[in-house]
Amino acid sequence: MKSQLAIAILAAIACGCAPLPPARDAAHPRGIAVEHHPSPNFDARRPNFVVIHHTGGSDVGRALRTLTDPAMGVSSHYLISRDGRIMQLVDERSRAWHAGESYWAGVDDLNSVSIGIELDNDGIEPYAEPMISALLALLADIRTRYDIPSSNIVGHGDVAPGRKVDPGALFPWRRLAAEGYGLWCEPPYPAVPADADTNLLLHAFGYSVERPDAAAAAFKRRFVPDDPSPFMTEKDRAILYCLVMQKQL
């Protein structure tokens, strides 16, 4: 159950009626004697990942209401409409509730270290050009402020394989990678070492392999979207190996 403080914060964000209280107030001890000697030596939360989502619907107003409803318990830092409007819902320094149970590259709580971006898309339609242009502009601005590595621009389906599939097979990952957001490999692909294990490669790239089939499906949805089969072919393995090598550069 969400705390009353958390509900109040979301309500304030939704109506714009009060600023978000400093993080130290939320963590202030109660019921015990504590001496306060404030130090100036601290930073706000610094995100190191971006997680991209789709709303799964066709009504941005409804998505906005859901993401700002205290009773729903979900949020994201940004929501981008089909016509390219960028709406900020949660301060980047705060932890939005968008990724849920998640894992990527050794991190098992993406909410605590990421910026969540929701795109107004139902998951089965092409992404609108104004939306993608706005997303690229937002990512460029985020990169100038946080220097987030390209390999840390991921989808919800990447960090929650088997549970989530967004932003889906129609999301233009190749285009984003060309702009420096996310990784992509073009042929010719390097030869995969004979002893390279597929699950180890998936894990080296960032995926949780607790469910290898789900990890493989998530990988293919992003990097081989024209092949819905969950089975990893030798070509798929070559792409994966190329990505792992690229990530290490």
Image (cartoon, rainbow, N blue to C red):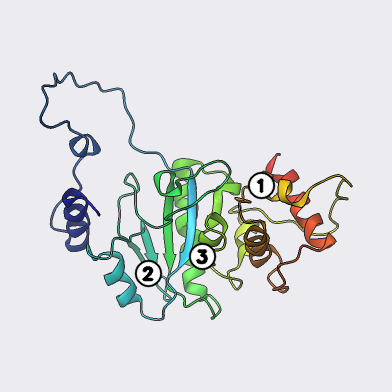
Residue 36 is situated, as x and y percent measured from the top left of the image, at 15, 21
- Alpha carbon separation for disc pair 2 and 3: 25 Å
> Where in the figure is residue 182, as x and y percent of width and height?
61, 53
Q: Which residue is mark 3?
A: 164
Quarter location, residue 119:
bottom left
Q: Amino acid at mark 3?
A: Lys
Q: Residues within 10 Å of mark 2 (few under 14, many from 20)?
A: few
> 143 or 90: which is nearer to us?
90
Which amino acid, mark 1? Answer: His
| Quadrant of image for the C terminus | top right
Count of number-bearing discs: 3
Q: Residue at x 67, y 61 (%)?
A: 213
Q: Which residue is mark 2?
A: 85
- Identify the mark nearer the N-term, 1 or 3: 3
- Image side of residue 149 versus residue 9, left or right: right
Please give the residue where the numbered disc 1 appears in the rendered image. Answer: 203
* Residue 197 appears left or right of 105: right
Where is residue 132? Give x, y as percent: 51, 68
Tell me the residue at 51%/60% (across/down). 156
Q: Quick one: SS at disc 3?
A: loop
Which residue is found at the position 74% from the left and 54% from the top?
A: 240
Report x, y in % for residue 163: 51, 63
Q: CA distance from mark 1 to mark 3?
A: 18 Å
